[in-house]
Amino acid sequence: VQLVESGGGLAQPGGSLRLSCTVSGTLFSTFAVGWYRQPSGKERELVAALSAGGSTNYADSVKGRFTISRDNNKNTAYLQMNYLKPEDTAVYYCAADSTGWRLRPNDYWGQGTQVSVSS
């Protein structure tokens, strides 16, 4: 199973970015997917997760600003990030889990993509 992330970069406060995670080597529609982030010098934390059945789990700090979604036809998960704040700056990691209902997926990981929010 391979996960490839894209879409990171630099955004201004209040701006938006969309991260993508394409998963290969498995039946994507049966997997749970999620996004984690790790700010420099801090621990990795769950940002958002989406089960195979459509249940979601968001960190309190991103509720109302970030949206996780998936396109099973494209084997891709997305994280739409709106109203970005400097504290959203981190390396963002995509994760997938063969336990489809798991809302803290952790079987497989992407390589990470940097998101920086600064004026």
Image (tube, helix red, strand yellow):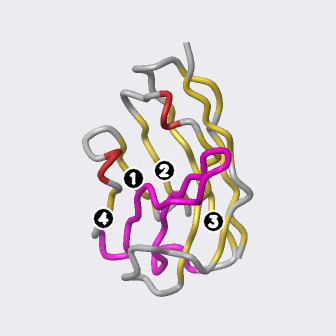
Q: Are marks 4 and 2 in contact (CB under 8 Å)?
A: no
Within the magenta stretch, is there residue 95? no
Type of amino acid at the residue the image marks with label 3: Val
Q: Residue at x 58, y 60 (%)?
A: 44
- N-term mark: 4 or 1: 4
Q: Are marks 1 and 2 in contact (CB under 8 Å)?
A: yes
Q: Residue at x 51, y 58 (%)?
A: 35
Label 3 sits on a secondary structure element that is strand
Q: Which residue is mark 2?
A: 78
Q: Which residue is mark 1?
A: 68
**C-alpha gap between disc 1 and disc 2:** 6 Å
Q: Residue furthest bottom?
A: 99
Where residue 82 appears, x then y in whole percent? 38, 31
Marks 3, 1: nearer the viewer: 1
Nearer to the camera, 98 or 117: 117
Type of amino acid at the residue the image marks with label 4: Thr
Label 2 sits on a secondary structure element that is strand
Range shown magenta = 27-54
Where residue 18 appears, x then y in whole percent? 51, 37
Where residue 86 appears, x then y in whole percent? 50, 28
Where residue 111 appears, x then y in whole percent? 74, 57
